[in-house]
Structure formats: structure tokens, C-alpha cells
Image (cartoon, grey):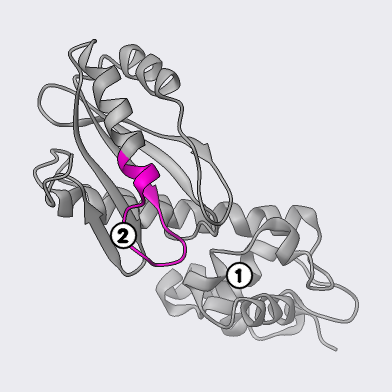
Amino acid sequence: MYSIKDWAKDDRPREKLRMKGAQALSDSELLAILITNGTRQKTALDLAKEVLQLGKNNLPQLGKLTVRDLMKVKGIGEAKAISIVAALEIGRRREATASRQKEIISSSADVAAYLQTLLKDYQHEVFAVLFLNRSNKVNHFQIISEGGITGTVADPRIILKRALEENAVSLILCHNHPSGSLKPSRADEELTQKIKEAARFFDIKVLDHLIVSEDGYFSFADEGIL
């Protein structure tokens, strides 16, 4: 087995990136750069191809894998797995930021595009909040709680404490449905009203509550049930 150092310069991932740019590299070549080095039996590129196979040769699917999942590939230790997860998270955040370039929230579709990018890879429910200023610009985004596959609970006290710290005048609540279903439960509706009533005492308005999945979104405000 030849090491990457024995390859022609045009075929070495790092050299190829330097000479031709990152866009010239395949997914496995980019991963090989993150992996840095291989084992006695496998090059970094070999390991990268196995990592991609673990993610079904699909980058969105790869983004759902945890450090522990990646370590199932023989030759991928904790440090390599952490590097891969970190790189994928940077890509996810870049995509989320790009989807929110307007910065000013003007519709549920604006919020949904932003939140779908941030939450699409979670395999369990998470409850998040967008904290907005007077101009409807997002001051802060925070995941408030994480639950199981079928549900999560959010504490209104934690949300309002953070809202006061961020000087927020309005909130947009959000949670994901990993199952893909966009129908709100009775518990979703009751929690929304509870947070809305609590926020009212501080002159903070709940503008919407969105349920998002990879397939779409549901807006409480658009449906007239906020």
C-alpha cells in the first residue's frame, strides 16, 4: 500500500487544493485532509471513503453522525472524529447564516429557512427560541432544551430570563419534529399559550411558534392559533 506522499502531486489532496482550489476536490479528498493521516493498512483517503460510506455517501446524512458513530470506522479515533464533526458544523452554520442574510424577519418562511438549516440534523426534539429587537432583527438564537425522539419541554422562566438579558422585545418559538410530521400536539399549543401569557407581563410579544422538519414547517401565527 502506497502512502499519499508517494502519489503524484496532482493526486495528493492538500497539493491538489493548493494548486486547483477546494472546489476541484471530491468529498472524500476533502475529508482526507481533515483526517490528516492514515494507518499502516489504509491511507487517509481510504479512511475518508469509509467515513462517507458510513454516511451512505451523502453529506447531509454524514452531518447526522456523532463522534461515536464516526469512531466505528477502524482508524478513525476520537480526534479525527471530532475534526470531522466540527467541520460539518461549520458548514451547517455557514448555510444557516446565508439563509438569514436579510437579518430582518419579515415572514414565517424567513424564519423557517433559517431554523430548518440549524435543526435538520437532530434525531431528537429540541426547543429553540429566536430573540428579536425592535427592528425585528435577531439578537440571539438559543436551544433551550433537548428531549427524546417524541418530545421536549421548555421552561418559560429560562426563556424569559434570556429574553431580558438580550433586551428582546419579541420572541419566535420553535421546535423540530424528527418524524417529519408538522401537526402540533395539544401539549405544543398549551406550552405556546403558557409562554405567551408569561411574556406579556414583561411587554414581550411572542410573534410565532414554528414546527420544522426536513419536509417543511408549520406556523402557529399563519394558522391563526397563536
Between 18 and 77, the one nearer to me in the picture: 77
**Residue 2 location, x and y as percent?**
82, 86
Q: Is residue 182 magenta?
A: yes
Which element carries disc 1, helix, strand or loop?
helix
Q: Position of residue 47 (x, y in %)?
A: 73, 76
Q: Is residue 172 above or below residue 186?
A: above
**How busy is the neighbourhood of tag 1: few (under 14 within 10 Å), some, or many (20 plus)?**
many
Q: Nearer the viewer, residue 215 or 97?
A: 215
The quarter holding residue 39 reads: bottom right
**Mark 2: which secondary structure?**
loop
Q: Position of residue 1 (x, y in %)?
A: 85, 89
Q: Nearer the viewer, mark 1 or mark 2?
A: 2
Q: Main secondary structure of the magenta part?
A: loop
In the picture of the structure, the residue carrying the numbered disc 2 is: 183
Q: Answer above or below: position of 128 versus 176.
A: above
Rendered image quadrant of residue 209: top left
